[in-house]
Amino acid sequence: MTQKAPFRARAEIDLAALRANVRALRARAPRAAVMAVVKSDAYGHGMVPCAKAALDAGAAWLGTATPEEALALRAAGIRSRVLCWLWTPGGPWREAIEADLDVSVSDMWALREATDAARDAGRRARVQLKADTGLGRGGCQPADWAALVAAARAAEEAGTVRVTGLWSHFACADEPGHPSIAAQLAVFRDLVAYAEKEGIEPEVRHIANSPATLTLPESHFDLVRTGIAVYGISPSPELGSSADFGLRPVMTLKAAVALVKHVPAGHGVSYGHHYVTDRETTLGLVPVGYADGIPRHASGRGPVLVGGAWRRVAGRVAMDQFVVDLGPDGAEEVGAGAEAVLFGPGDRGEPSAEDWAEAADTIAYEIVTRIGTRVPRVYIDDEQ
């Protein structure tokens, strides 16, 4: 469905592109199942519609950070396998177990809470053991792995747990040739081998994220966890562009120009007057700002397609708006209500999320994920 009514701003989400991306990722990892990671509202794209589209395209699993996200998928009627991994003490373990979610465990406290909740629920918890193979974030340290594996096996024998997976996460898979990649793979293989020797029989072993899915076939194992690539964004410009991997960006961010006006030379623009006009010119007001997720760090640099040409943010990005300098003849090309395209796939010459990432000195993941709730998502599906 395409929105026809007037709008301040909107993010158009191309579900056909998302399905095509999932199919492309499946082709990259033909011997592994694909998990579509839909955490953080599907990286800002809308969790439930994107989850359904990914499953339609053949994703076998969904992944979320928090259990609350996973439970929201269940509340929306999604019954696929779902792994949720970011737990804190006292989390909704019983609700997750009763909802048939797979829960990640990195430490003894988490395994205890999962087994206690399983007893209360009267059913086995589906648990995946996470190893810290070198990222230094979540996961069990190799020195503590034997104890966690032994406790998990005991819980299996007691009937409270079924260990469904063994997994880890790369630190530098988006940096080709980084020595940590081979080192982490070696540690992961060793820890998996130890767990299996001790009687663990996982359904899935997985370490590959988006960059590893695209470039490290030796890391695919039984399952690949694809996040940003599902949404058509390259995980790293050093690895290649979206097009290089056969991916298409899913989100196009647009706004309607709110005001066009002539100003004299020497006119300050936006807070602090970091931009001052050097001639008579025309300014256009774009009604989105950092409250909508437009990065303030892109002040003076963020690109926008307006009136068939790239313009740059003139001066500071404010909470609700920013300004572009349309040039002396801008009013002839652009009027109030004209479309400003901040980023998209590039089909019409518009900037990309990567262009905004460069302008803000960040990564494209952040650009799409930070688009706020004031910007409605409009779902377009040319396959239906």
Image (cartoon, grey):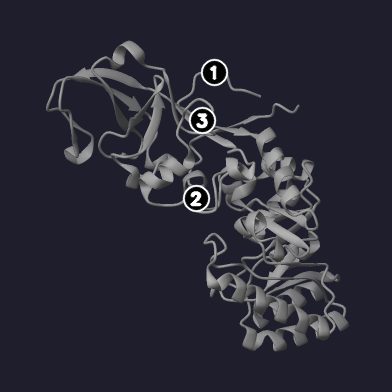
Foreground residue, 69 or 28? 28
Q: Which residue is mark 2?
A: 237
For numbered disc 1, what is the local secondary structure? loop
Give the label, 1 or 3, closer to the camera.
3
Is residue 27 positioned above or below 92 on the image? above
Between marks 2 and 3, how big is the CA–CA gap? 26 Å
User: Of helix, strand and loop, which one carries label 2?
Assistant: loop
On residue 5, the disc is 1
**Is the C-beta separation of discs 2 and 3 under 8 Å?**
no
Q: Earlier in the sequence, mark 2 or mark 3?
A: 3
Query: Quick check: can you spot residue 179?
Result: yes
Q: Which residue is mark 3?
A: 10
Q: Quadrant of residue 246?
A: top right
Q: Nearer the viewer, mark 2 or mark 1?
A: 2
Q: Residues within 10 Å of mark 3 (few under 14, many from 20)?
A: many
Q: Earlier in the sequence, mark 2 or mark 1?
A: 1
Residue 225 percent across, percent down from the top left:
68, 58
Q: Which element type, helix, strand or loop, lies under badge 3?
A: strand
Q: Is residue 56 left or right of residue 208?
A: right
Task: Please provide percent x and percent y for residue 129.
Answer: 72, 74
Q: Is residue 191 above or below residue 27?
A: below
Spot the residue most to the front.
Answer: 177
Instruction: Using the image, determine if residue 127 lies above or below residue 274.
Output: below
Measured as percent of width and height from the top left, residue 281 is found at: 21, 20
- Outermost left residue: 266
Residue depicted at 81% across the width and 51% down the height = 79
Q: Amino acid at mark 3?
A: Arg
**How far, Cα to Cα, is label 2 from label 1?**
36 Å
**Res. 89 in view:** no
